[in-house]
Image: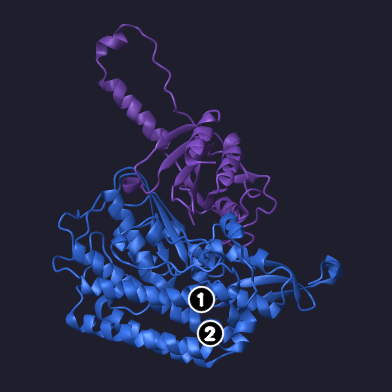
Chain colours: A blue, B purple
Amino acid sequence: MNAEYQLPEDECFVLNLGPQHPSTHGVARIKLTLDGEYICKAEPVLGYIHRMHEKMAENRTWPQFFPNTGRLDYLHALAYNQNYACLVERALAIEVPERAEYIRVITTELNRIASHMVWYGAFVLDLGGFTPLLYTFDDREQILDLLESVTGSRLTFSYFRFGGVPNDIDDDFIAGTKTFISRMRERIKMYHALITKNVILINRLKDIGFIPAEMCRKYGASGPVARGAGIDYDVRRNEPYSIYDRFEFEIPVYHEADSMARYMVRMDEILQSLRIIEQAIATLPAGPIMADKVPKLIRPPKGDYYHAVETARGRLGMRAVSDGSAIPWRLKLRTPCFSNMLIFGEACRGMLLADAVALFGSLDLVIPDVDK
Amino acid sequence: MTRAELVKNLQALPGAVVSDTDHKARGFDLDVKLSPENIAEAVQLMDEAGYFLDTMTGVDWLGEQEALRKEADKGKAAAPASESAAGEPPLPQAGIGEDEIEIVYDFNNFQEPYGVVLRVRTPRAKPEVPSIHHIYPIAHWHEREAHEFFGVVFTGHPYLVPLLLPEDADYHPLLKDFVA
């Protein structure tokens, strides 16, 4: 947009995008100030599904908070389970058995792929292509069936426990996962041929929605948004937790910082997750799935603890303050979408409204994760 | 600015208490206690060193002073009676006063991960901390959140209206004495 042509504020008009608009994935509302089709100002308005998880944490015992962790980012719930389990295990200095760590990695990575598949379908849907949604949900269905067989749920997982996992994986799960890996590799090739090379998609994404590295740092953006801007940062690699340092995998980084770069990061990430799962299955050790020395009553020693993991959307951090009792004194949730969403207000300035929707989709926001 | 220089500069701030922490046990590497008037300067240093603001939050320490007082009383009772009989005036109890709210800032680095925690404390009765939104724009939201949850006023913040709570909310739910 030509800056000289910008209308004075009182001649612009205000449009509410959401809270029920389908492209806002849930209940985000963005107050847009428009000059014709161009955006002068965008202000995200939050809180439509605020549930106050942080206060809920102060009302229940440490294990009782587990189900809440699956309800923040419902698409990658297992990473939230994992972070909470790791956080309390760190506070209590519990060693998790090898086999449990492997099961955690396998299920969390499967969940990551499922999350990316929802993003993929919904993102292309935002851009006007309906059919891919049906294909990606088919892939996701395969993963959910596998995860259901071990975790017992399909969406809001609450599978991990302090010290391990409650259910072991069986031969059927392993065989099913192996079949899924080979299937998914073929599907990714198909997606690239069908969608990535589609000229309409390229024109909608390339050189549009610029989020440079410095902006990512100032806003604390992480995950595919930062990696699409050339920042080589992944918590799994930079601050290894669990057993991620044992696997060979690459962190896909693109330097273009446009919507296409963020798209490509996620597509490559799916292949890397498959690699991790493959290696984990090949080296899966036998043994117990629960640590023996987990106290019946969880009372972490006085002090504050922090733990971060990489979810499908970026860096998730949890900060717990314990006063030595069975109930958390304070639990802060640092959700990745919170930081990734404010960036939209700055990045979409001067863009066409339709391009801003594409930019919004490329951020892969899950609103319950922002609203907490 | 290298890491060593950053630590040195943080230590040079008046009243700063800097201590190393064990990352494996706690999840961060450097713990810095500051007084509220120096927070903007410290955050400026973090920005110059290339860190990103991971998160910031509040902790309500209601009842902490009461617990300290009880502990001190217990200590006094346990002390040998001969000492008090000697007629020495009781020592002023350091650090016991009003309850406080702590604001915790978490920083980290994309290039070489190093978790830095800055902490400031402000009286619970009149919580006020200078805003840092002009240094890190994401603090705009974090401060609005801490304001609505704890009632902390971030001086210099241009738009301190509730972010997640209803726009007319006049309560602060994460305060320990909040009742619905």
Residue B147 in the image: state x and y as whole percent. Answer: 58, 51
Q: Nearer the viewer, residue A56 or A36?
A: A36
Residue A281 in the image: state x and y as whole percent. Answer: 23, 74
Residue A261 in the image: state x and y as whole percent. Answer: 55, 73
Residue at position x 50%, y 50% from top?
B57
Sooner in the amino-acid sequence: mark 2 or mark 1: 2
Q: Which mark is residue A264?
A: 1
On screen, residue A100 versus residue B51, left or right, reads left
Chain under disc 2: A
Q: Amino acid at mark 1?
A: Met
Say which quarter of the image contains residue B154. Answer: top right
Residue at position x 53%, y 85% from top?
A196
Quadrant where the N terminus of chain A lies? bottom right
Residue at position x 62%, y 88% from top?
A200
Is B180 situated above or below A208?
A: above
Single out the residue that lies furthest toward the bottom: A131
Single out the residue that lies furthest toward the top: B86
Q: Which residue is mark 2?
A: A196
Residue at position x 59%, y 44% from top?
B48
Q: Tell me the crowding category of disc 1: few under 14, some 14 to 19, or many 20 or more residues within 10 angstroms, Cα based.
A: some
On screen, residue A280 versus residue A341, left or right, reads left
Q: Tell me the crowding category of disc 2: few under 14, some 14 to 19, or many 20 or more residues within 10 angstroms, Cα based.
A: some
- Work out whether residue B55 can be spotted: yes
Say which quarter of the image contains residue B122. Answer: top right
Q: Which mark is residue A357?
A: none
Is A175 situated above or below B33?
A: below
Q: Amino acid at mark 2?
A: Thr
Task: Kindly check if marks 2 and 1 are in contact, taking CB atoms under 8 A apart as contact.
Answer: yes
Residue A143 in the image: state x and y as whole percent. Answer: 34, 82
